[in-house]
Image (cartoon, helix red, strand yellow):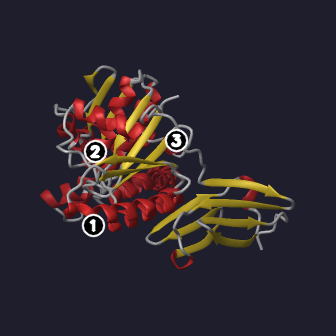
Amino acid sequence: MTRVLLFTGKGGVGKTTTAAATALRCAEAGHRTVILSTDPAHSLGDALDQPIGSSAEPIGEGLWGQQLDAQQRMEEGWHEIQAYLRKVFQWAGVEGLEAEELSVIPGLDEIFGLSDIKAYVDADEWDVVVVDCAPTAETLRFLSLPDILARYMERLFPAGRQVSKVVGPVVARATSLPVADDGVFAAVSAFYERLDGVREILTDPARTSVRLVVNPERMVIAEARRTHTYLSLFGYAVDAVIANRVLPDDIADPWFDRWKAHHLEHLRTIEDSFAPLPILTSELASGELVGAQALRELGARLYGEQDPSAVLHEGQPLRIARRGRHTTLSLDLPFAVRDDLELGRRGDELLVKVGGHRRAIALPDSLRSRRITDAALRRGRLTVTFDGSGDDG
């Protein structure tokens, strides 16, 4: 089974170097490893000190690398759809560059990143896929896409194609509005097929783990806490927190005493806040972490003798359990508070909103006809109780 390791964190915390060091250590442990960067900054090649192409290329013994080229992927997988959308916008009076821009939906680069992850897993040629994600805000959008796209595909695409076949000839006679033909729908179908099963891969805690990279700084830790909450909301398992750039003990200059005291305090906060997750620490390096040797040393400090591809903490954010006549659905929401939490139900879905992020959880068949009798948020876990009557109420 291919392991997928996702690295994210606030911009500037050392996420890319940590991901690269992990990939290098996995490869040197004998795992066939590919590292993929979805970060638009494209700094992976800088960290490895060698050029990285837009497709997987060997960059070391047992190690391949890729920096996502969103423009190239768009030309491969979006060209026919984009051509149709341009026609529609031009019919509506939008010309030239504006029509070109509007025909590219937001988040396409993240979508192509997801499809590449799935392609690597499906190929069954790799033991480990390491993903250097964009900073946290973009990562959250990236990881919420499988939920959003699945819902649109299930609800809109089949109906849309049927409607097009029925009303297309009528529209064509009555107006000059361009009507999507079978070629466009085939392109849309192929586009979505590239993503089919992505959510199952990324939310399987035995296969995929997220690792949060932080520095011992108050604002960075606060953002990491929020990120952990939102990742759990969407069903992604975090198996470790990496505390990077900690001041080493052997710095004796009195000027650093206050900084060292702050770092010690923040490390205690990290350990207390994210328990029981393991905290991997790395001291502030004396120079730039560039090139294989520097990354190799970083990987050794982080992982020691343990396998970097292993599941470092076992957990499942979403669980369903039977308790007598009642059934509970429980969801990890670490650091969430009641004032930020909204809960609702719409048909066969349970709607959970935390802050600015919302997830629609498709209820299993056994819960769809049951009435919610209780909901509680305790110690970072939301528990929703369903009765056993089968009455929607």
Q: Which residue lies at the image location 74% right of the left edge and 66% below the top edge?
A: 385
Numbered badge on residue 169:
none
Screen quadrant of the C terminus: bottom right
- Place of residue 117 in the rendered image (x, y in percent of width and height, measured from the top left): 40, 37
Q: Secondary structure under badge 2? A: helix
Q: Residues within 10 Å of mark 2 (few under 14, many from 20)?
A: many
Going from N to C along the chain, the mark reached first, 1 or 2, is 2
Residue named by callout 2: 16
Measured in 3D between alpha carbons, the distance from the residue under mark 3 to the one under mark 2, in whole angstroms, is 20 Å
- Place of residue 85 in the rendered image (x, y in percent of width and height, measured from the top left): 28, 53
Viewer-proximal residue among 64 and 350: 64
Measured in 3D between alpha carbons, the distance from the residue under mark 1 to the one under mark 2, in whole angstroms, is 28 Å
Q: Secondary structure under badge 1? A: helix
Numbered badge on residue 312:
3
Counting labels gives: 3
- Compared with 24, 236 (above or below) is below
- Residue 125 appears in the figure: yes
Residue 390 as seen in the image, left or right of residue 219: right
Numbered badge on residue 258:
1
- Place of residue 230 in the rendered image (x, y in percent of width and height, measured from the top left): 47, 61
Going from N to C along the chain, the mark reached first, 3 or 1, is 1
Q: Which marked residue is nearer to the observer: mark 3 or mark 2?
A: 3
Instruction: Give, as a three-letter code, the residue at label 3.
Output: Leu
- Place of residue 262 in the rendered image (x, y in percent of width and height, measured from the top left): 33, 65
Q: Residues within 10 Å of mark 3 (few under 14, many from 20)?
A: some
Going from N to C along the chain, the mark reached first, 3 or 2, is 2
